[in-house]
Image (cartoon, rainbow, N blue to C red):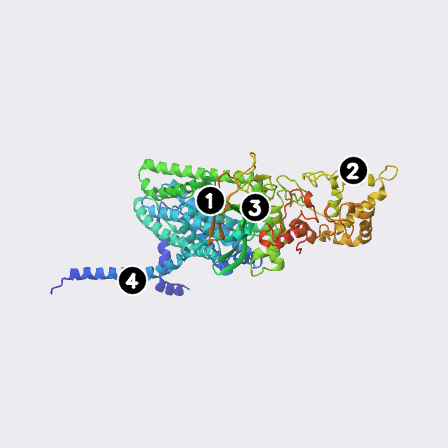
Amino acid sequence: MTDSPAPLQERRGFLAKLLAIVGGGAALLAPTALGAVSFFNPLRQKGRAGGFFKLATLDVLPDDGTPLKIAVVAERVDAWNRYPNESIGAVYLRRAGKKDVKVEALQVVCPHAGCSIMFEPGEKSGKFFCPCHNASFDLAGVRTDRTSPSPRDMDALEAEIRNGDEVWVKFQTFATGTSRKTAQS
Amino acid sequence: MNAILTWINDRTGIRDAWRAFTDAPLAGGACWLRTLPAAIFLTFCVQAITGFFLWMYYSPSTQTAWESVYYLQYQVLGGWLLRAAHHFAGQATLVLAGLYLLALIFSGRYRAPRETVYWIALLMVLCSLALLLTGDLLAWSQNGYAGTKVRASFSMLLPGIGEEAYKLLIGGPAFGHLTLTRFLALHIGLFGGGFALMLVLHFVFARRANRTLVLEVKKTAPFWPDQAARNAVVFFIVLAAISGLSLWHGCREADLHRGVALGSPADPAPTNSFDAARPEWAFRGLYQFSHYFPGDKAIYAIFVVPGAILLLFFLLPFLGRWRPVDYLNRAGTSALLIALVGLSYLSYSQDADDPKHRNVLAEEQLRADRAIALARAKGIPATGALTLLQNDALAEGRLLFRQNCASCHNATDKDGLDIAAEKPSAPDLHGFASREWIKGLLDPKQIMTPKYFGGTKIRGGMIDFVRKTLPDLLQDENGKQSLEAEKNLAKVVMAVSAEAQLPSQCDLDNRDKKLIEEGRVLLVDDFGCTDCHKFRGQGKLGMAPDLTGYGSKAWIAAFTSDPKSKRFYGQKNDRMPSYAESVDPSRNLLSPHSLEMLADWLRGDWFKE
């Protein structure tokens, strides 16, 4: 007899524990891991292409810097459904900069109470005007009256020119009524 | 009978287990505190059973969630009561779990040997809060949708992993079908299942703690009969409360509002966001608290402070080992409770005093009622109940008017459905082009009030005519009021108003056909309206708005498209925007469909049952 009974018992106990851990672990962990993979799938989904939209081409924008109002119509995908054309807002686009071409983009939504700002062509270059409470802004979106009802200037949006003549704008909406420009998700 | 029971017991041990349960001595004898976990077990059973049957009717997707809840609520026999019972059992579970937790703390029973029992109670409170939060979204109504959107966006505050946490929570980059499927799974599987697990663990842990305590205390008594009797009393009180609340809610206003109210279907359009979303009562204190941490500081109100408090609560059994800290724990819990109640009160009273908030809620109620009425009368298309509202002049027209017109125009309705401008600077459009409206316009006393041109910059022209020329036309040669001329003016009013072909005046217009014919002639010959206005081939465009088809659907659509055109105000246009002047639809503020809805709404031309 080389094996004493005690170590045999110990070894059996160890084997049983190992079996329980491996077996139980496999039974619980494998399906959980499978579930987790699918659970994390939303991380692969991208939002609206980084929020940038192609809204126009350069040749559409007037040379004299007159702003043009462009509706932001976007395709929306919700899991298995595709909604081809949904209007999600509008943007004023205008040419700026004399030497190198630059495009400025402004939200049409008034920062005061959320009305739609109008563009009024005038003798010189025209101005932006909100019909609700008579806030007026210059072409760069800066408030022109000292007692403006608007707590801040018009909300500028990031605009880029891509591929030579495509105008891409990062479309965002902002909380109204505050001096701070806070983007809404 | 006995033989059958013995047979069953021999093979399952169920009777032995029951006897062990009822005969085991309880430390300290029967007490009311022990009725609380029993009552929680009861309310959870109600929730689980009613929830199971709700599940049979529920369909989680953005086009079917509200719709399936609507169907359950209004078409399924007793569905509203099932939903109400589930709702109130959920509220009761939270109240009871909260009470139990507080009772454990204030009676010092959160300490050894009951630490695990206390932790389970704490987890029960958290689970029932999570059930409330996830359940709120499932009906996909405006309030639940908007509120959940805000709450989910808090995950973005987490530094570094914000966006990932948000996507994992809502199942993608934006709210949609997968948010609903995810929340349903969390609601039932994780939090519902988790709660069931907590109940089992509570039973095991409480029994174990009891076995230790029995050895230490003198007074013991078995479960049966004293504790059983107390449990029964609490059972009946809780059941009566749940059934009472569910039924009482059902008896209030006919059958439209029976049971727990179903809001209007969620509208994901950014322009139609619901500005009055509020969390359930249990979160009101935290909601108010977060108001003191604006902007970037929100993370303190949402994660840091509540997280720290929660951590303290988990550590309470360890902290409470020392007597003085035990008292501190109780004092701290009281202070927290008072703060939460105070903050909640503040939040509710602020809302009650806020007319804007009440206004948004009233609008939401109108939309909800309309959605339900339309669904009942027409049935819901496959695209969902939101389509019903979007194609309904009463709902959509009203919404468009509030968004686009109400900054200048009132629409004062005696029925209490007023839309009031902040600072009216243009005519009140309620009953536009009706006989009464046109009669008022032609009244020298009224034309310069805010109801008509009072707030506008329009001067001369029509105003001078009504105030100076018209009174002369209404006098006879002797300078007296001419009854004849007044009758003629009434005919002119009828004739102009008949151009609108308002549905509400259909019978009147048919009755007064002859008078209207006469009015059309008088308008040109006696009153000289066509000196400025064009009317049915007489007069010219360019000086004043065209009276041909005045107030008709086509006229209103054309006017709102471009009031600056020659057919309407031309250069004299005050501040009325052109909503669709371009041939390129993407340049226009409103689509033809929107203009049509607006026109129909102004004309009172919508679906009636």
**Secondary structure category for the residue under label 1:** helix
Marked residue chain, label 2: B
How many angstroms separate mark 4 from mark 2 (CA)? 100 Å
Q: The N terminus of chain B lies in which quarter of the figure?
A: bottom left
Residue under pointer 2: B468
Q: Earlier in the sequence, mark 1 or mark 2?
A: 1
**Residue with the mark numbered 4:** A23
| Camera-side residue of A33 and B163 | B163
**Same chain, labels 4 and 2:** no
Report the chain holding disc 3.
A
Could you say where residue A134 lies in the image, as x and y percent from the top left? 60, 39
Measured Cα–Cα span from mark 1 to mark 4: 43 Å
* Distance CA(mark 1)–CA(mark 2): 63 Å
Q: Give the number of the mark in front: 4 or 2.
A: 2
Q: Do the residues labelled 1 and 2 touch (CB within 8 Å)?
A: no
Residue B182 placement: quadrant:
bottom left
Q: Which amino acid does label 1 sit on?
A: Phe
- Looking at the rendered structure, whether the residues under marks 1 and 3 are on a common chain is answered as no
How many numbered badges does the structure rendering display?
Answer: 4
Distance between the Cα atoms at labels 2 and 3? 44 Å
Q: Is residue B201 left or right of residue A88?
A: left
Tell me, yes or no, whether the two marked residues, 2 and 3, touch with CB atoms within 8 Å.
no
Type of amino acid at the residue the image marks with label 2? Lys
- Residue B228 shows in this picture: no
Do the numbered discs 1 and 3 sit on residues whose CB atoms are within 8 Å? no
* Foreground of the two, B311 or B264: B264
Q: Mark 3 points at which residue?
A: A66
Q: Mark 1 points at which residue?
A: B283
Identify which amino acid the numbered label 4 is placed on: Gly
Report the front residue among B445 and B356.
B445
Query: Residue at the location (36% across, 47% down)?
Result: B119
Lower position in the chain sequence, tag 3 or tag 4: 4
